[in-house]
Image (cartoon, coloured by chain):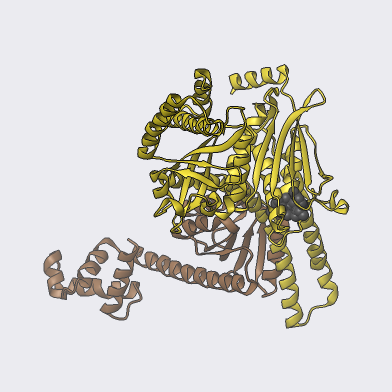
Amino acid sequence: MLPASDMLWLALVVLGGSLTAVLIVLGVVLARLRDAERRLDERESRHESMLDRLQENEYRLRTIIESEPECVKLQAEDGTVLEINPAGLRLVDANQPADIIGRKIFSVVAPEYVDIYRENMRRVFAGEAMVYEFRAITLKNRVAWMETHAAPLRDARGNIYALLGITRDITEHKQAEEQARRHQTELARVARLSTMGEMATGIAHELNQPLSAIANFSRGCIRRLRSGGMSPVELIEPLEEVCEQAERAGDILRHVRDFVRKSEPHLKPMDVNQIVRAVVKFTEHEARQQRTLVRLNLDPLLPKVAADAIMIEQVMVNLVRNAIEAMSEANSSRREITISSRLFETDFVEIEIVDTGPGIDGSLIDQVFDQFFTTKPEGVGMGLAISRSIIESHGGTVRAESSRDGGAILRFTLTINTQQSSRRERADSIHS
Amino acid sequence: MNEPTVFIVDDDQAVARSLRWLIESVRLRVETYASAQAFIDGYDAARSGCLVLDVRMPGMSGIELQERLAAQRIRIPIIFITGHGDVQMAVRAVQAGAFDFIEKPFNDQDLLDRIQRAIARDAEQRDRDQQRARLRTLFASLTPRESEVLDLVVEGLSNKAVANALGLSAKTVEVHRAKVMEKMHARSVSDLVKMAMQRQGWG
Ligand SMILES: Nc1ncnc2c1ncn2[C@@H]1O[C@H](COP(=O)(O)OP(=O)(O)OP(=O)(O)O)[C@@H](O)[C@H]1O
Ligand SMILES: [Mg+2]
């Protein structure tokens, strides 16, 4: 009924952590014993002695779990709390078991995490062992960060009938982590802005020249006109200068575009999936705040691409951020982003970012990559323009589409790193 | 005295021309130079006025030009024109003796006012310099003996005390003293004291 290999498998799969593993195994044993008991009862078993043994075992296991300092609980598929130990009661600030047993676990999950929590539960009930974090709001409205190690419990026929969860309060750890992350995103933001900022300073400086020339010529004209005694003909030359300088300013602005495009990427062989994961981390906070679930569908066997990781991160952050923004602006009820990576033709890797937002209007599809094109009140309209110039400088392409079920699909390609370029890379590093 | 001139040094020819057009509107004489080097080569230190300099220039920067002029003891007032990010550079320039700075984009009246102040300052400076030069020639016209007498008189010694100190007769001291007064164009001992103090001021 409880093959040793089964227990071992559970122990290994669920976690590496020994205490938690033991607890889960104990939990499974308990559940199965109880299951066996029920079935024995049903059959009105004649094996009284065995039942006694089972009950005795359950009693012992129960004692261990009851005295376990961490929260151990069983949940039904709909989220109903079936069992919880005293440590669990303390964790959710329940005075007695009835405060939480028989109620939905979602009553203590922070609203922005309910969808993600449900999705995680769904996966456990589909047979996956998982570790997930969420923000909890206890019965006494205390906010805390929790980490749950969850595993499916199966009956003898292999059907999953409950989720066994061991939950810890990780608030302190989380706060430290949050701080570190904030620091990191802040750094990333500063890095991004400082390149933009440098560019802006350069442009401002360049523009200052013709603009001050225009101001000087014009003021000079006004002063002469005010003081009189000036023939209009004498004003022609300075006014022509004004026109010339205005054109010069226009030229500078036209060059901005080339300026953006000209920043050369530093290509290196890169694992695109690794970049995707980094981007998920960068945007995790925003995604969570906007109750957006990010799924990954990455081909683990992809060859390396030739890419400037920072630049590609920037592109993906732009795309993911756009998706998050689109779904939150449209108040989409389902907010999911799926990032996939796959081989494309023979020389490319394609990255696809699909969201469940409103999609992009067909008439705008050609415009969204234009500089300063934005439909957002706070938008600059540079995100996609910069992304496109980066991807093109990598020799790839980027396209936008609307998916059949409404959301937007953004795809871009990167070239697979060839032997040659990696040799060149090596040569570069030797010379430098 | 020569007519004050506003010397503009800016590598951006359009900006230089526009400044000329603006500054000439208040009937000031303007000359433009395309580089710091061109200005150094063409400038005669005797010419009064002020210098309007772009902080950022290729080749010799505005700051370097300021240093070169200072090394040659040319004290024409300098107004730096700075871009957005260069204010700190300009502050340092002012600490190093530049007259003023103005940030682009500037108000025209503001610039013209500063130019007028700089020109006035230059005129004062040149006045003082002239006075000193005059004093220097006056002092140089004295014989060694007359200088000795002057030094003691200025210290407040009577003719008798001067005579004692120098081992001369009171009569001789009297003669020297009259000669000193005449050569120095001084009407009183206190005039002499003032002149001596001025000389000390510039050592
Ligand atoms: N995933 C998406 N779903 C729907 N519309 C989108 C999506 N991504 C981009 N768009 C549209 O394309 C426009 C341009 O996007 P882009 O990233 O270039 O600029 P932005 O997001 O408006 O401003 P910012 O410069 O701050 O990124 C957006 O304003 C929006 O209308
Ligand atoms: Mg954007």
Give the vertical position of B171 relative to B99 (above or below).
Answer: below
Depth check, front residue: B51 or A315: A315
Q: Residue furthest right?
A: A363
- Pinpoint residue B151: horizontal percent, then vertical percent: 23, 67
Q: Quadrant of residue B111?
A: bottom right
Chain coloured brown in the rendered structure: B
Give the vertical position of A148 relative to B158 (above or below).
Answer: above
Depth check, front residue: A49 or A330: A49
Instruction: Let me know if residue B142 appears in the view.
Output: no
**In this structure image, what is the colour of chain A?**
yellow
- Pinpoint residue B55: horizontal percent, then vertical percent: 57, 55
Give the vertical position of B81 relative to A384 (above or below).
Answer: below
* Residue located at (78% from left, 32% from top): A395
- Pinpoint residue A70: horizontal percent, then vertical percent: 40, 40
Residue A403 as seen in the image, left or right of residue B170:
right
**Quarter in which the C terminus of chain A is drawn:** top right
Residue A235 as seen in the image, left or right of residue A418:
right
Depth check, front residue: B143 or A228: A228
Residue B151 as seen in the image, left or right of residue A67:
left
Q: How many marks?
A: 0
